[in-house]
Image (cartoon, rainbow, N blue to C red):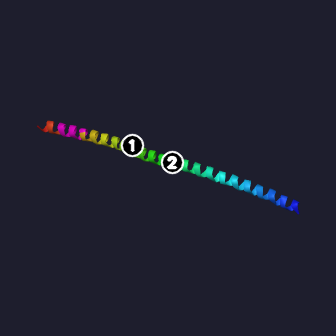
Amino acid sequence: MDCVNCKYEKVIEKIQEDVRDLFSKINNSIIRQTSIEGDVKYLISAINEMKAKIDILASIPGKRWETIIASIIAAIIGLAVGRFF
């Protein structure tokens, strides 16, 4: 009868060890997940900042073209006014 209990004790000890290992792995996963969440929040923030800067940079060539076109129109008007007067 004692051998039967010894057999169950070994099984129970193995189960307890497995449960400890699982808890350890779960805790490590939670710690890694928390770290990853922080990294993702930082990346989202950085992406939003880059997007704002890209929007600013994208609008600059448009402003330059507007200035160039306005200068050309002013020159044409100046030439036209100069010829007539």
Q: Is 49 in front, or is 62? A: 49
Tag 1 secondary structure: helix
Tag 2 secondary structure: helix
Q: Is residue 25 above or below residue 83?
A: below
Magenta stretch mostly in which secondary structure?
helix
Q: Earlier in the sequence, mark 2 or mark 1?
A: 2
Circles 2 and 1: CB atoms closer than 8 Å:
no
Q: Residues within 10 Å of mark 1 (few under 14, many from 20)?
A: few
Please name the amino acid that badge 1 sits on.
Lys
- For residue 16, which quarter of the picture? bottom right
Give the image location of residue 12, x and y in percent.
77, 58
Q: Is 82 in front, or is 9? A: 9
Residue, disc 2? 38
Residue, disc 1? 53
- Start-end of magenta stretch: 71-79
Task: Tell us which disc is closer to us: 2 or 1.
Answer: 2
